[in-house]
Amino acid sequence: MIGAAASGKSTAARLLACALQKTDPSPVRYISSSAIRHDLYGAAGGLGSWHEVEAVIQQELCEALTAGETAIVEASYSKRAFRLALTQAMTLPQPVQWIGWWLDTPQHLCLQWNQQRDNPVPDTVIRRQCAQLLQSAPVPHRKEGFSQVVRLQTAQERPLAVIIQAALAGMEATIQRGANRDAAHELHGYSRLLDQERLLYLVLLLCQHPKLTVTGCPPDPDLDLLLSPLPAGGLAEKAAAILARLHGACYGDAAAISRDLEWLEHQGFMAQGEDNGGGTDALPSIEPPPWPVGKPRPSGGLSRLADREAFCQTVTVLRHLLHHPCAQGEGERINEHIAAALTRESGGRRRWQARQVHTAITETLTPYGFRRPGRSGRRGFALGTALLSIQQLQEAFRLLQLQADDLGDRSAAVLGSSLRERLQQIGADPDRHPPRRRWLQPHRLAQTVLQAGRQLDPDGESVIEAAIRLRQKLLIATPMAPRKPSGSLAIWPLQLLLHSGRWWLLHEHAAYGTQEGLLACTPLDGLHVFQAEQHSSRDPAVHREALERATTLLQVCGGVHLGADLAQQQALLRASGEDRRALPHTLRLRCSPEAMARVRRDLERFHPNVIRLSAPLPGDSWGGSPQRRYELQADDDPLHPYSVEIDLPAWVLEGDPDLRRWLLAHGAGIRLEGPTALVEEHRHTLTQALSLYAPVEEDVPCSQASPAPSAEVTPIPSPTAQRSGDCCSGQQSGRRRNPVR
């Protein structure tokens, strides 16, 4: 008897017992959960413990079957796990034929009848049981091991006794029709619904909580929410305890789960095997365990997956989605794409249809929680935490290792170490093949990076990174300042930047009385952190707006030199279009064809709207460089025909060391033309460098000795000046060459 409390189960059980004895004189034993609770806990004992009540029900049931009696078991059985514990998980002294009698009584009648009972149950219990039977859980069905499920709807005008008698009259024919349909199923080791669901729930658990499979893994807060503390033992024991807690005690068979884990590993769910360098090895065809020899076919109903062919199809699709998450084909329906991929994986031995994939997803994977409700599958499916394929995970590890080894990123090192360990555990060792790329740096950063945040949490997150994530204020001392709390600077950290081989902290000065502070970049090596304000957090909108302003300023400046004047920063950021273009000064230079090719690549650091270039002359090509706007024209200068103009803030032109190193790196390939102060500074730097190489008298042969040079050192002339009197400052004896707009 199945139904919510006060749904009329006891009345239906008595009517059924009378109807059975009219046709069969054999005794009928009525096993009532209400009577058992009364015996265990007394009249005022309440509901008590279901496990204790269930143990007495099973004991009395075994006694009745041993005595050859027909048994009527009456309890709510509102959950499938409760019903499967009786029909499939319980070891019985002899085979039985289960008939489910479902009292489908409306909730308002249950609540009304409950008030007429001597010991009413709480109304919340009735509402929960009605919801479990009709809304939040699968309804009673033949596949749970019942030969037939009779749905008794007591709200009908017909008397309940008449409904029961009519169901008994047609029961034999109904059972025979169901048995004929099930006879076509080719049974296998997972044909019982209990075994199928335990396997599916196990795969889902491992997908959603992969840390469960890691030996010696630190405590996982997500697993603690499921069950705390986890029992001792291996993966099978822990998984059994969690499945029993989540889905019901009948799913918590550790010995059966151990066999399930072994089967999943053999079917390619838990190990990748050797990588041949060209993709995944061919996975074996799904082969379920055989139906036990000598065991009779179930007398109850069977699910769709009880058939070997349907089971293999569904599990194959499940395995494919785990190995290839979010896979999709351009212009191809997702089910057709998966079907084509499965056909290729089978080597053409089997041709998959899109409807087979659709059936597996909609009838099994979605109901069992692999695909979350409301998630569209048009762009591929992702099950649990499986978001990347094995090859993508291996490539992600190599990138993390690259970042950790060559850039000194501690977070990447910790995450990469964890990823390597887990890939090795599933037989997909990422170290089997050498790395395919490296980053060459002028010096290793591993010894100097993140000196300001040495304290790391278990996930490898530094103090600075934690402050960025939590939007917390930091008190720091810059590299040139004394490391004393009295001279500390309060900042809002925004991002960590890798620029010119060094790590920098992008931050905003904490402003008091105003919402915006000075934006700045400080090198991490030598930066000292005094403390972080852990009990307060910045408003997310304000933090995001500061990061957007800083990102714009980095693009406009073309580097990390953001200036030291808040008013100048605000004026530049608040200007737009032509107004912003009028604020900065213009860097003007001319390039040789070879230098122009290099300059074009370096201009990625600047915002596109601040750059103006000359179009290439016939015969000059710079490969696949990005498209630029050509607002200037090249001239007939044989050495420096190409003009370049870059609008930059005044503070960048006045003091950015990166800009000066960039200009000097091009040597004689460029000629500065403005602004005048930068041209003079550039000329002075080159003059000083040239003076270091001026010949001394003793180094010159006597026969070639020249008059002693004057005290004033002559500036180095540009190639153009040698031809026409031009100098580095752009002064010419003849006409001046200006860029043509």
Image (cartoon, rainbow, N blue to C red):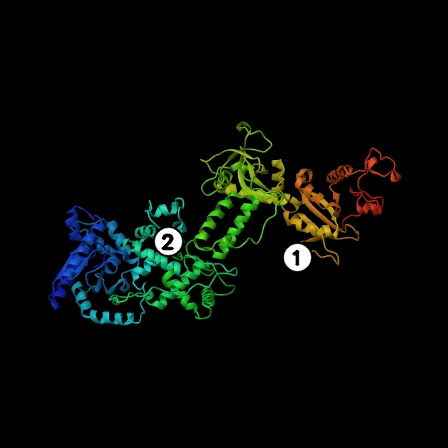
Residue beneath the point at 68% across and 51% down: 600
Instruction: Describe the element under mark 2 as helix, strand or loop.
Output: helix
* Residue 96: image location, x then y, percent: 20, 64
Location of the N terminus (image quadrant): bottom left
Viewer-proximal residue, 94 or 590?
94
Which residue carries the number 2 mark?
205
Q: Is residue 485 visible?
A: yes
Q: Is residue 83 above or below residue 670?
A: below
* Residue 589: image location, x then y, percent: 73, 46
**Mark 1–mark 2 distance (CA, rounded to whole Å):** 49 Å
Going from N to C along the chain, the mark reached first, 1 or 2, is: 2
Residue type at the position of mark 2? Leu
Residue type at the position of mark 1? Gly
Viewer-proximal residue, 450 or 564?
450
- Residue sticking out furthest to the top: 486
Which residue carries the number 1 mark?
624
How crowded pointer 2 is (Cα within 10 Å; few <14, some 14-19, many 20+) is rated as some
